[in-house]
């Protein structure tokens, strides 16, 4: 994943786009290992469309496979 991309606050996360999400625990940022998508009803996994019950604190664009 693109370690150079800047983490943004979760309140600014766009809808209907593949995103990398993270949670902060203590003083560490833990990124999820799968892409997520914000929907009006909550977060889902990008590939399976399963609901993900998390409370992320940060986001950045999911890196493309170019």
Image: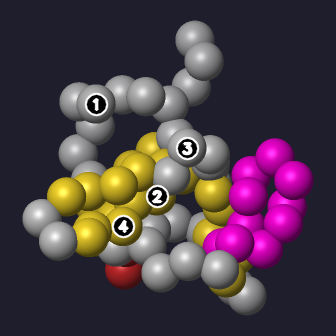
Q: Which residue is label 2 attached to? A: 21
**Picture layout, residue 66 above or below residue 12:** above
Question: Is there CB contact under 8 Å for labels 4 and 1?
Answer: no
Among the two numbered marks 1 and 2 on one chain, the one whose residue lies closer to the N terminus: 1
Magenta stretch, residue numbers: 43-52
Q: Which residue is label 4 attached to? A: 23
Locate residue 15: give its quadrant. Answer: bottom right
Q: Which residue is label 3 attached to? A: 33
Query: Residue at (51%, 66%) from the top-left corner?
Result: 14
SS class, disc 2: strand
**Picture layout, residue 59 above or below residue 15:** above
SS class, disc 3: loop
Q: Which residue is label 1 attached to? A: 3
Among the two numbered marks 3 and 2 on one chain, the one whose residue lies closer to the N terminus: 2
Query: Residue at (56%, 25%) from the top-left corner?
Result: 64
In front: mark 4 or mark 1?
A: 4
Locate residue 65: give its quadrant. Answer: top right
In the displayed image of the protein, which residue is found farthest to the top? Answer: 66
Distance Cα–Cα, label 1 vs label 2: 13 Å
Distance Cα–Cα, label 3 vs label 2: 9 Å
**What coloring was used for the rendering?**
secondary structure
Distance Cα–Cα, label 2 vs label 4: 7 Å
Residue 37 spot, x, y in % from top left: 66, 61
Left or right: where 60 falls relative to 19? left
In front: mark 3 or mark 1?
A: 3
């Amino acid at each position: 994943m693109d370690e150079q991309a800047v983490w943004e606050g979760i309140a600014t996360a766009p809808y209907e786009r593949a995103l990398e999400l993270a949670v902060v625990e203590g003083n560490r940022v833990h990124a999820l290992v799968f892409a997520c998508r914000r929907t009006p009803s909550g977060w889902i996994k990008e590939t399976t469309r399963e609901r993900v019950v998390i409370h992320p604190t940060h986001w950045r664009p999911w890196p493309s496979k170019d």
